[in-house]
Image (cartoon, rainbow, N blue to C red):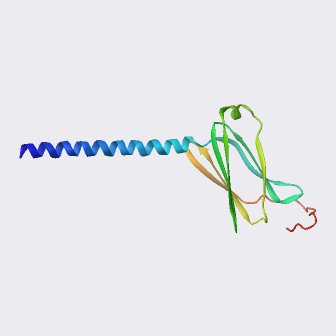
Amino acid sequence: MARSGRWVTWAGAVVALLLLLLAAWLYDLRMREIRSFATLEQLDLRAIPRAPLAAELVYRPTSAGKVEFIRVASQSKETLVEHHSIEDTTNRDPRRFSWTGADRDYKVLVRYRENGRIREQWFDPPQLNGPRTLERGQTY
């Protein structure tokens, strides 16, 4: 009886150790995913004059890592992943790129790191200020 009691105690200790190792491994995986994203100091979605179907994303990375931009429209989903090195953070100029779609019925999701978590921020299409002159064939 005493021998089987020691066996159960030993097996329970091994199971507890394995569960602890599993929890530590899962925590490490999550932290690696979070650390793979860059932190941002500035993030904005702006309208582009004379291009009512386009938007300009302006952001400034403050750490190395990736930033995910996902444009979700009624019929499509586009993803852009920007990777930044530590050298990119020394340049204080904001990063810019424009994104043009087929219509203004879309949203943009930006994923980045903030305060030790992955932040997801949604943007609606930027408002156009005042009347715009459309090129031939464009609709608004």
Q: Quadrant of the C terminus?
A: bottom right
Tell me what residue is drawn at x 17 percent, y 43 percent.
9
Where is residue 19 shown, x and y percent of the image? 32, 46
Where is residue 29 shown, x and y percent of the image? 47, 44
Using the rendered image of the protein, determine whether residue 116 is visible from the camera's viewpoint.
no
Tell me what residue is drawn at x 38 percent, y 45 percent.
23
For the residue pair 79 and 127, the one nearer the viewer reads as 79
Tell me what residue is drawn at x 63 percent, y 43 percent.
66
Where is residue 5 shown, x and y percent of the image? 11, 45
Tell me what residue is drawn at x 69 percent, y 65 percent.
76
46 in relation to 104, above or below = above
Q: Is residue 48 left or right of residue 57?
A: right
Using the rendered image of the protein, determine whether residue 101 is visible from the camera's viewpoint.
yes
For the residue pair 62 and 25, the one nearer the viewer reads as 25
Image quadrant in which you'd find residue 107:
bottom right
Q: Is residue 55 left or right of residue 122?
A: right
58 in relation to 74, above or below = above
Q: Is residue 98 left or right of residue 17?
A: right
- Marker count (numbered): 0
Image quadrant in which you'd find residue 51:
bottom right
Where is residue 130 shown, x and y percent of the image? 89, 60
